[in-house]
Image: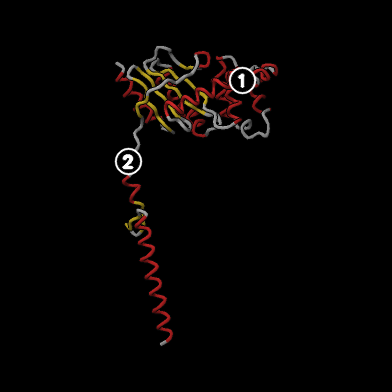
Amino acid sequence: MQIIKRISRFMALIIVYVFCAYGYLATKGFVFENNTFILSNEAQAKEEPFSKRVRGDIGILPERIRAMGDVNAPLTMYIYSSLACAHCRDFHKFTLPKLNRDYISQGKLRFVFIHFPLEPMSMRAAKISYCLPADRFYKFIDELYDKKDWLFSENEEKLYDHARKFGLSNQGIEACKADKRLTSDILLVKEAAIKNFDIKGTPAFIVEGRDGKELIMGTKSYSEFKEYLDHRLGAQR
């Protein structure tokens, strides 16, 4: 008889626990469906639009513009990118070549890389990229995205080794490091992106045409960019 009472109490505790757990999960937005709990609030969340209209000045000085493509292209894409950002690297290595093939080289799109450094090493790399001749800028960016040794190095020498490969002398490296105006230019463009477009991370894109500017945040596939660009190009006619 004592054993039965113990079993009864144990079963009662289990039932109470189950009901309490169910109640707690229900208050957090979970529902029981197909033998499992799912968060119903997630299903109800609205999808963010692919792009949104924005206004404001990008603020990059003409001498800092490093562009690919025709200056008279109907659309210009500005990418805010950090050289320490893995998603930026993926875009640069896998998506940009396709955009170059189908849009930039065809005169449909102008592309401008804007540094948005996230930590000190990517800031140093951003400065060095501007100290190289303009025609070596994108090749240097390619190099830094391909080679990560400079990013994880305990000092700056790996980064400067890459710069030397692209023709920057030791004297040029020291002058670049000491260039406070260059540091200011990079930070002012970053601050403008935060203030004018609420950009807080990378990659982020501004696509500008006759119909205005639109902001695209985060990683997107080439097919998504293609659909978007074809639609925007149609609007420019």
Q: Quadrant of the C terminus?
A: top left
Residue found at the very far bottom of the displayed protein: 1
Tag 1 and tag 2, C-beta contact below 8 Å: no
Residue at the location (37% across, 31% down)? 224
Residue placed under numbered mark 1 in the picture: 180
| Residue 208 placement: quadrant | top left
Residue at the location (52% across, 13% down)? 63
| Residue 108 placement: quadrant | top left
Q: Which disc number belongs to residue 62?
A: none
Tell me if residue 66 comes above or below residue 12 in the rendering: above
Residue at the location (40% across, 71% down)? 14
- Mark 1 is on which residue type? Lys
Secondary structure found at label 2: loop
Q: Local crowd at mark 2 within 10 Å, few (<14), some, or many (≥20)?
A: few
Question: Is 75 in front, or is 91?
Answer: 75
Tell me if residue 216 comes above or below residue 176 in the rendering: below
- Mark 2 is on which residue type? Lys
Residue placed under numbered mark 2 in the picture: 46
Tell me if residue 62 comes above or below residue 152 in the rendering: above
Residue at the location (55% across, 14% down)? 135
